[in-house]
Amino acid sequence: MLSARWMNKHKPFWARLDDLVKRTGHQGVQALNHKELQELGLLYRQSASDLSAAREDASSQPLARYLNQLLGRAHNLIYMGRRGNPMGIITFYRETYPRIFRETFAYTLAAFIVFLAGAGFGFLLCLHDPAFPRHVLGAHMMDTIDRREMWTHSVVTMKPLASSGIMTNNLIVSFAAFAYGLTAGIGTLYMMAMNGLLFGVVSTACWQAAMAGQLFSFVAAHGVLELPAIFIAGGGGFLIARGLLFPGYLSRRDSLSRAGGKAVRLLLGTIPMLVIAGIIEGFISPTDLAPVVKYLLAAALFTLLVLYLGLAGRPPDAAASPLSSASPPDSSSANFALRGA
């Protein structure tokens, strides 16, 4: 049971924290000077410790509720106190997103490896069992491939509708690969593997029908954006699973919160990539443009993507390696450090 002496000792700290929170009003943390901001952080950590002590005492539940509400108000002030910046979205895509991508590149690489393993497995299954592609792709699509015809010609006749449908489908796949991270990564693993398997089966079936050139000239221009976006979303799912399964010295809730914050930003960064890929897939990929033009477009887009993800957001004197060098900590890491973890 918490003693009266303990209560009297800590009440002034809670009152001071409450006063600082009230004083901010609509101005947020801008209403406080530097010394008061430091005091706010210290009082927040102290009150969080007091809340833990109050929760362990069954007779102190009213105090625990009061401290929980006080900390909730202070948390909103500390972590969401800045006013929205209209330029924030530009800063996010120009600096924050490529930096987070580099910090979490290992998870994107893991998603790519799973996809590649699925594609290789699909290739081997097709070689082992010539009937396997028909089971996976269906009789109609296989009949089209057997006639050495591409199944994408219908896209040309309804470009706007097809482009919209393609974007929607790609966004659904990416969001699902991301969200399935909450299944401890099992759902994300399944989606990456199955998409890889499907890609391997389609590629093998077209190769066996002497249509590999037609397939890859169709896929190249939009695939250099679409596939990396899906890998990045899958990497976000694996990042969530990592926070859920391996919290380390953090509580599982805090670990998941930190991992989820980065993963959400990874997912948000894929949206422009998928939109552009959908437009290209609807308006350029299925057309009769010369394959060399499509390959050149693919090369240009992929080069720009690599330069953007590898170099954007770096200080001028950063090391030349785009993926291996350490990058500055993001805001969530800074906030974590300020909490004194």
Image (cartoon, rainbow, N blue to C red):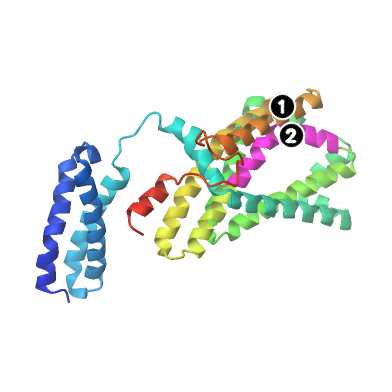
Q: CA distance from mark 2 to mark 1?
A: 8 Å
In the image, residue 95 sits, relative to residue 105, either above or below, namely: above
Do callouts 2 and 1 mark residues in contact (Cβ within 8 Å)?
Answer: yes
Residue picked out by circle 2: 220
Q: Name the residue: 59% across, 52% down.
A: 107
Label 1 secondary element: helix
Q: Amino acid at mark 1?
A: Leu
Residue 126 placement (x, y as % from top left): 84, 53
Q: Main secondary structure of the magenta part?
A: helix
Q: Which mark is residue 297?
A: 1
Q: Could you classify mark 2 by the number of other residues whose Cα lies within 10 Å: few (under 14), some (14-19), or many (20 or more)?
A: many
The percent position of residue 56, horizontal first and vertical second, equals 25, 73
In this view of the protein, which residue sits in the foreground, 7 or 99? 99
Instruction: Residue at 73% x, 51% y: name it.
Output: 116
Q: Could you say which is closer to the camera, residue 233 or residue 138? A: 233
Mark 2: which amino acid? Answer: Ala
Residue shown at the point (30%, 35%) measured from the top left: 83
The magenta segment is 212-232
Image quadrant occupied by the N terminus: bottom left
